Every structure is written in structure tokens, then in C-alpha cells.
Amino acid sequence: MAMLTHAQIWTALDRLAERSGLSPSGLARKAGLDPTTFNKSKRITGDGRERWPSTESVAKALAATDTAIDTFVQFIEDTARATQAVPLLGFAEAGAGGYFDDGGFPVGKGWDEVGLPSVHDEHAYALEISGDSMKPAYRDGDVIVVSPGTSIRRGDRVVVKTRDGEVMVKELKRRTAKMIELQSLNPNHVNRTLAASDVEWIARIVWASQ
């Protein structure tokens, strides 16, 4: 039997939260735990090692959601069959040089790795959101999976990198040969219209942990 991985357990907890209509922090609160117990930032130690959730925290989460251990095991087994190891980078670092090639594909060193639901794109990568500039769509600590090989349509959420190094998450409103119109996910932030020549790459968001 294959060993359990950190990603399988944490993803199973994410599925438990989702099944209960909760965020990971909402699940922790419901279980009477510190709200940050299941946050993405708590899954790695300060020196970069993967951290397991405690048996007690899992037991409290199951009790709080009235979920049988058999169901949680099924979540783990489903996750084991349908996970893909993807490179992970903090969103704040995405604008720095050396992490992407000209086509928006991940390259170079400095990437971590995380197991997430399979998106069937070998070039897919994950970005961890920092700050509140993308609320309510994405919150601090959420992880988004970006697929540079997936076609993009109007209404898709996308990551855009400009030639001057700015990286942003927006919704694609309109795209022509000469320009790209982007709608902000946060109503407090303005929409953007960029010349196509100013855009280095644009890639579709295909999954998000919430």
C-alpha cells in the first residue's frame, strides 16, 4: 500500500470543508479550533518542512461536521487517485524575473510543489494568494491553479503578466488583436484595459482552493 502524503490529507480536509459549505478556516472555527489551524500557511513549517494536521484536529473536524471516519478515508482515497503535483509559488513573487518563460510556463528554481486535484495540464502551476486585493473572489492563503495550456474565453478568470513585470488576477471581459479588457474581481479596484503588445502572457485559472 502506498504511503499517505501530506497533500492527500490536507486536500481531504479541504473536501470535508467544501462538503460542509465551509472554508478551511470556517471548518476550524466550527470544530472549536484556532481559525488558522487548517490554513495553507500552517501546512508548512517555518523551515520549509511539510506539516501534518494533528489527529485531534481531524477528529474535532469530523465531529463538528457529523462526518464518519469512513467518509474521510474515502476523501483521501479519491484524492490519491486524482491529484497532480504542481509547482507552487507565492503570488507576490510571480512578478519577479526567472519564474516564467515568455509563454507563461513555469521555469527555473525557487518553486515549491503541492499536490492538488488533477487539471490534466503538465505545465499547470499554483499561486498562493497574499493580501485582500482579490476579495471576495480569492482570500489571503487561497491557492489558485493556472493552466497556461488551456484556451481562454470571455468570462474566464485569468492571470496576466505585463511586459513591465506586473502580475494581476482579473476576469477577461474582451480580447481583440490589439487590446485586452479586464474586469477586477474586487469592486474597490478599477478595471483595466491593456494593449495586447503590453501583455507578456495571459493564462486561465482552472481551480481554486476556497
Image: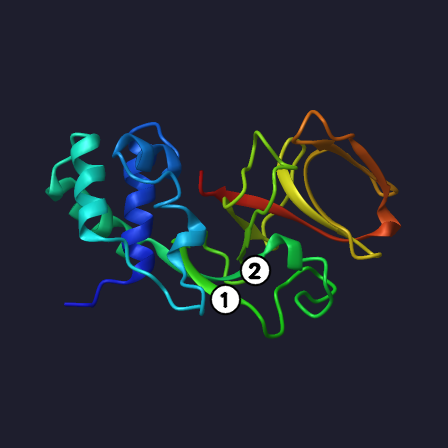
Residue drawn at x 38%, y 56% is: 43
Number of residue marks: 2
Give whichever of 145, 138 is nearer the camera.
138
Residue drawn at x 71%, y 61% is: 103
Residue that label 1 marks: 112
Q: The N terminus is located in which quarter?
A: bottom left
User: Which numbered disc covers residue 175?
Assistant: none
For label 2, the SS is strand
Residue that label 2 marks: 89
Instruction: Report x, y in % for residue 98.
Output: 70, 70
Task: Tell me if label 1 and label 2 are in contact, CB under 8 Å.
Answer: yes
**Above or below: residue 174 compared with residue 177:** above
Instruction: Report x, y in % for residue 40.
Output: 43, 50
Give whichever of 172, 22 is nearer the camera.
22
Mark 1 or mark 2: whose residue is earlier in sequence = 2
Amino acid at circle 1? Asp
